[in-house]
Image (cartoon, helix red, strand yellow):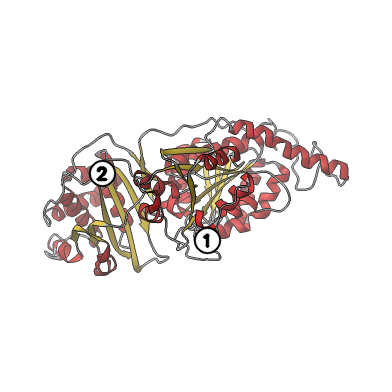
Amino acid sequence: MMNMRMNILFGGKAGQGINELSIMIGKVATNLGYWVFNYKDYQSLIRGGHNFNVLCISDKPIKSYDNKIDLLVALDQNTIEFHKDELSDKNEIISEEIINSRGLIREHKLDKKVVNAIYAGSVIKKLGIELNELESVFNENFSGEILKHDILAAKLGNELVEEKYSLKKVGDKKYFINGNYGIAIGAIASGLDIYFAYPMSPATTILHDLAKKQIEYNYVVHQPENELGAINNTIGAAFAGAKTFTSTSGGGFDLMSETLSLQGISEIPLVVALIQRQGPGTGAPTYTSQGDLNAALYSGHGDFSRILIAPGDAKECIELTNQAFYLSYKFGLLSIILSDKHLAEDMICFEKPPEILDVKDRNHPNYPGKTIVKATSYEHLPNKETTEDPIEIKKGIERRLEKIKDYEKEIENFKTTKIYGNGKNLIIGFGSTKGAILDSLDELNAKFLQILYLEPFPKDKVKKMIEDSQDFIVVENNVVGQLSDLITKHTGIIIPKEKRLLKYDAMPFTPHDIVNSLVRWKK
């Protein structure tokens, strides 16, 4: 039988298909009922450098990755050098030397592109999984001569190594997706008509995922000239009656801020996904951060309301994207979905299908083409006629802010926070920190308070949880503690430096990081 949890690292150069290889093995494991987490680490390079994935497999739920490697799959020698200090005591290595030792590609006249299938066959053998399970995954993804050659290559790779583990079927097949795919599915489930976006890592795969499905689900994907074009097309098409959506990362979001204000005064529904990366500036564009919380809360000039939602796993990405559409189109709001590279690109398992709301059309029946419809960025009367009368300006602002009461009442039907675990101490977090926090709870005398809605902020719930705890800490992937400051703003509770667990090296938290920082809480 397998260990409670095992970690496989796949490493090599950019362009060698590291991610695809890791995902293939992950799909085999999830088909057998295992819980799997796939962490993706890559440089901003098309070729060369060093990329790696850590694939974690367990017979119990896991939500994060670990950095002790049980099986190292090295597509180049550098991978062994880079990760030799991370190997566990009982490690196994499948190296480039082993794969190339018999000259299989030359002997069987195979295309060099099938080398990853040879690796896959070797990994499957090492895990003690029947080869037909890998062939089933190949059949789902390939066809024709490619499929034929991959199956042959996998069989050859299967003969190169000896079995080490024995992973047999332990349960039903599980969903296995990343956060960006979840956001794409949430948009489709909400009745998406048009998606506009300009590529910017790590938001780009939403564009790719939605482009692949546009014919199947009858919507349009369009890439305009830049992020300004993307958001202006998004709000323009929404004015014309379509359900629209856009996504970007930090630099693109900065460019969109003027249109956020246009939404605030025009009240045209607008849904935006902000996928954070390390910054400011270009920063480290393929690595993670939670440094854009304040940007999401405050971008745009003038006073206007917004919804800000932060999912913590791929299933929540589906459900909260759907809620963002629901609230935006019911109340004429700006809805922002806040994610980050770690959540966006790393794959996780879940069992039960997501809960989906029916997103109705805008709450007024008229659209351009049917009758005359007005919208304006100027201050205006209820009938959209512009005004500079101070009395009417005041009324207009108050009228727009008055609907806060309506959507806050509606949000009471949703989970604005979630609580996990038992214990006298409290860990508070949002977004992608969820996985590492959950996987650390077994070693700590603690509960976890996950904040899903950052605007409107669930201040009463958060304040009570803090006041009822023996000790608390706020976990964030940024340098100043933006969530901590937001909690203070809404609750009046001052959060000192020693109660802010901050990580800002562009890497996500692991359970090891959290447990080591909270040794005083250990059971």
How far is mark 2 from mark 1, CA to CA? 37 Å
Q: Is residue 214 visible?
A: no
The image quarter in which residue 363 lies: top right
Q: How busy is the neighbourhood of tag 2: few (under 14 within 10 Å), some, or many (20 plus)?
A: many
Q: Is residue 371 left or right of residue 504?
A: right
As rendered, which of 497 and 268 lies closer to the eye? 497
Q: Earlier in the sequence, mark 2 or mark 1?
A: 2
Q: Which mark is residue 311?
A: none
Residue 324 in the image: state x and y as whole percent: 56, 39
> Callout 1, which amino acid?
Val
Residue 232 appears left or right of 184: right
> Residue 240, position in %: x, y?
66, 40
Q: Quadrant of the C terminus?
A: top left
Q: Is residue 160 above or below residue 333?
A: below
**Which label lies toward us, 2 or 1?**
1
Judging depth in this view, the residue of 305 and 241 nearest the camera is 305
SS class, disc 1: loop
Q: Residue at x 11, y 64 (%)?
A: 102
Say which amino acid is labelled 2: Ala
User: Which element is circle 2 on?
Assistant: helix
> Which of the 4 image quadrants contains residue 112?
bottom left
User: In this view of the protein, can residue 165 be seen by the observer?
Assistant: yes
On screen, residue 10 above or below 415: below
Which residue, given by chain and number where applicable, does mark 1 sit on?
479
- Residue bearing the label numbered 2: 29
Count of numbered circles on the image: 2
Q: Residues within 10 Å of mark 1 (few under 14, many from 20)?
A: some
Task: From this view, report whether residue 286 is shown above or below residue 303.
Answer: below
Residue at horizontal 43%, vertical 53%? 342
Seen from the viewer's position, the closer of residues 496 and 355 is 496
